[in-house]
Image (cartoon, rainbow, N blue to C red):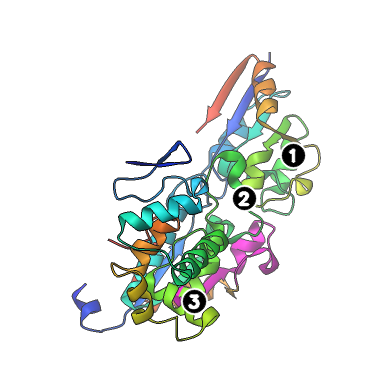
């Protein structure tokens, strides 16, 4: 499949994860979120931006458990917990937030 | 798998023996290690022979069209995989020292590595 | 009349480099690529063997493969040329034949 952003076609795999993370932009993130039934708020962006920073440092999309722990470390336990993250991304912060952030599907995520 | 679900913790060791980038083994094992973290087992990583090159600092494979997965070894700590061992002889044969490595490791002699391996429940070498 | 020999396996793992060095003729060029580039560095267990080879053979190593592995081109054995892809082509074009020791 493919998305269209600023008139350009942007390739994605059959589940909607971008093929090339470098083609990501905020407009595209909004589109993917909409497809997922999510309206982006500053709280959503905070997690998406965190994932992009994590990817740029480690070159992987983290497992949910690892993401939760890393967010707790950086933003505190109020945000670094399953309840908070699943409220923002009901079908899983790993799957949905990674997709919106333009990252590949987390390793080991089925 | 039954053992994992019943809460029995086994000692796993992934033994890395191959240089990165020339073949796909290093990346495949790394992915397996990341997945194994989900099963809460006692995971050990050993780097010996050309495997020590996998955690060499300063890898920039963009010029050969290969993804740089070396930063991912630094993410292992966040996955609670902190038992990393490197064989001293393998470093020396390649003119490397512990300072050349991009993650904290414990350097063991070949004899010590052999003993450590012998104490594992499951050993997977690639 | 010379030959370009390419070696792409680590000498620590396979015997291709040994086989190549044992058969190459004086004046031939050797190009270390992929996992073989470790053999170009000084300070390894192969340094003596490579330094001997350098007396009769022209040793080369592919720079992008060194960079990929975080290996310092400044640390190659004396007399070894670090070449880029264009240099690879020049080596192949400048020899009568190419032999890839896979």
Q: Chain of mark 2?
A: C
Query: At 21% across and 79% down in the image, what residue appears?
Result: B5
Magenta stretch contains residue A100: no
Disc 1 marks which residue? C52
Disc 2 marks which residue? C69
Between residue A1 and residue B120, name the one nearer to us. A1
Q: Where is residue B111 drawn, in percent x and y? A: 53, 73
Disc 3 marks which residue? A70
| C-beta proximity under 8 Å, tags 1 and 3 | no
Between residue C78 and residue A53, name the one nearer to us. A53
Q: On screen, A9 above or below C86?
A: below
Q: On screen, C66 above or below C96?
A: below
In this rendering, which labeled residue sits more in front, label 2 or label 3? 3
Q: Chain of mark 3?
A: A
| The magenta segment | B79-103
Q: Splitting the image into 4 quarters, where does residue A33 fall? A: bottom left
């Amino acid at each position: 499949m493919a998305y269209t952003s600023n008139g350009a076609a942007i390739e994605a795999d059959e589940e909607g994860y971008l093929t090339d993370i470098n083609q990501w932009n905020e407009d595209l993130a909004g589109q993917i979120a909409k497809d997922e039934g999510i309206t982006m708020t500053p709280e959503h962006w905070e997690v998406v931006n965190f994932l992009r920073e994590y990817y740029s440092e480690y070159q992987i999309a983290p497992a949910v458990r690892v993401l939760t722990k890393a967010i707790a470390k950086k933003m505190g336990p109020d945000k670094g917990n399953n309840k908070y993250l699943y409220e923002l991304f009901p079908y899983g912060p790993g799957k949905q937030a990674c997709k919106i952030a333009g990252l590949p599907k987390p390793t080991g995520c089925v | 798998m039954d053992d994992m679900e019943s809460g029995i913790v086994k000692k796993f060791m992934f033994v890395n023996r191959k240089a990165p980038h020339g073949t796909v083994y290093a990346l495949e094992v790394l992915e397996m290690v990341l997945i194994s973290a989900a099963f809460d087992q006692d995971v050990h990583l050993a780097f010996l022979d050309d495997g020590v090159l996998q955690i060499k600092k300063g890898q920039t494979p963009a010029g050969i069209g290969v993804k740089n997965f070396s930063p991912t070894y630094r993410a292992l700590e966040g996955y609670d995989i902190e038992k990393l061992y490197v064989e001293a002889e393998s470093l020396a044969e390649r003119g490397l020292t512990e300072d050349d490595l991009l993650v904290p490791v414990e350097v063991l002699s070949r004899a010590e590595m052999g003993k450590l391996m012998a104490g594992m429940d499951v050993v997977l070498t690639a | 009349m010379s030959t370009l020999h390419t070696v792409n396996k680590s000498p620590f793992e396979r015997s291709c480099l040994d086989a190549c060095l044992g058969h190459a003729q004086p004046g031939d060029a050797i190009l270390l690529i992929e996992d073989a580039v470790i053999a170009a560095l000084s300070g390894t267990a192969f340094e003596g063997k490579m330094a001997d080879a350098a007396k009769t053979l022209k040793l080369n190593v592919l720079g992008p493969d060194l960079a990929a592995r975080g290996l310092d081109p400044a640390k190659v054995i004396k007399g070894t040329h670090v070449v880029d892809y264009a240099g690879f082509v020049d080596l192949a074009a400048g020899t009568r034949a190419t032999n890839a020791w896979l």
